[in-house]
C-alpha cells in the first residue's frame, strides 16, 4: 500500500465517522455553543464555535484544499479556505449531511486522481512548507482536531458521542 493509499483509507474512514457524529445530534444541538469558563475562555468567539460552524468549516476547507492542490505550481501558496455560501445556507442537520456526503464523494474522486507529481511538489500554506502528500496528512490532522471539538461540544450538551475510531470498515487493513 502506498502512502497515498494509506491516506485515502484513513481520511475516508475519519470523514465517514464524522457523519456518525453528526447523525447523533438534533437541530438544537447543531447550534449549541461551548461552555465558557475561566479556563476555557473563548470571548466573543464563543458564539461562533458550534457543531454547525465546525462541520461547515471542515466540509468547506477540505473541498477547497483538495481541489486547489493539483493546479498549484511548484512552490506556490495554497490559499486559506473561505466560507462557502452553499454550506452556510444549509440550516438543518439532514440537509447539511446530504451536501457534505456529496462533497466528500467528490473529494475522494479528486484525491484518487492526484498524480505522483501533485504529491511530491512543494507548496506553502500559512507560511509553512509542505509537499502535496505532507499537506494531505495535515488535512487529516485538521479534521481530527475539529472532530475532537465536535466531540467536546456534544458531550457538553449531554449527547453521547460515537466511540472514536469505531469505524465502519472492519475487514480491510486501514492505513
Image (cartoon, rainbow, N blue to C red):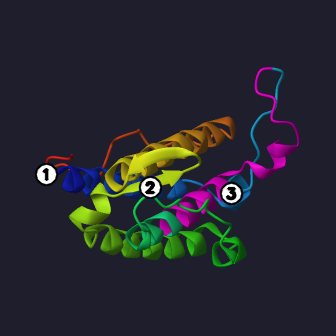
Q: Does label 3 or label 2 sit earlier along the sequence? A: 3
Q: Position of residue 146 (x, y in %)?
A: 56, 45
Q: Does label 1 or label 2 sit earlier along the sequence? A: 2
Q: Which residue is mark 3?
A: 53
Residue 169 appears anywhere in the view: no
Q: Position of residue 149 (x, y in %)?
A: 60, 40
Q: Position of residue 163 (x, y in %)?
A: 41, 39
Magenta segment: 39-63
Q: Please give the name of the residue rendered at 50% of the width and 52% of the height, measured from the top-left corner.
A: 124
Q: Are marks 1 and 2 in contact (CB under 8 Å)?
A: no
Q: Camera-side residue: 3 or 101?
A: 3
Q: Which residue is mark 2?
A: 123
Above or below residue 24? Residue 89 is below
Q: Are marks 3 and 2 in contact (CB under 8 Å)?
A: no
Q: Please give the name of the residue rendered at 56% of the width and 41% of the height, measured from the top-left corner.
A: 151
Above or below residue 67? Residue 45 is above
* Label 2 residue SS: strand
Residue 34 appears anywhere in the view: yes
Report the Cα–Cα distance between label 1 and label 2: 32 Å
Q: Please give the name of the residue rendered at 81% of the width and 43% of the height, measured from the top-left corner.
A: 46
Q: Position of residue 78 (x, y in %)?
A: 52, 60
In magenta stretch: residue 43: yes
Report the Cα–Cα distance between label 3 and label 2: 27 Å
* Label 3 residue SS: helix
Q: Which residue is mark 1?
A: 172
- Sort mark 3 into few (<14), some (14-19) or many (20+) by Cα contacts within 10 Å: some
Q: Camera-side residue: 22 or 1?
A: 1
Amino acid at each position: 500500500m502506498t502512502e497515498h493509499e494509506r491516506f485515502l483509507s484513513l481520511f475516508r474512514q475519519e470523514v465517514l465517522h464524522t457523519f456518525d457524529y453528526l447523525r447523533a445530534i438534533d437541530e438544537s444541538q447543531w447550534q449549541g455553543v461551548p461552555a465558557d469558563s475561566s479556563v476555557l475562555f473563548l470571548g466573543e468567539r464563543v458564539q461562533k464555535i458550534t457543531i454547525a460552524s465546525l462541520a461547515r468549516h471542515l466540509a468547506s476547507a477540505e473541498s477547497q484544499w483538495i481541489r486547489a492542490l493539483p493546479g498549484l505550481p511548484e512552490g506556490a501558496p495554497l490559499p486559506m479556505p473561505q466560507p462557502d455560501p452553499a454550506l452556510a445556507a444549509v440550516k438543518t442537520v439532514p440537509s447539511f449531511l446530504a451536501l457534505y456526503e456529496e462533497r466528500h464523494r467528490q473529494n475522494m474522486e479528486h484525491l484518487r486522481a492526484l498524480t505522483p507529481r501533485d504529491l511530491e511538489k512543494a507548496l506553502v500554506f500559512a507560511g509553512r512548507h509542505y509537499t502535496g502528500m505532507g499537506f494531505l496528512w495535515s488535512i487529516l490532522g485538521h479534521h481530527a482536531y475539529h472532530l475532537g471539538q465536535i466531540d467536546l461540544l456534544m458531550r457538553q450538551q449531554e449527547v453521547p458521542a460515537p466511540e472514536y475510531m469505531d469505524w465502519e470498515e472492519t475487514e480491510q487493513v486501514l492505513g
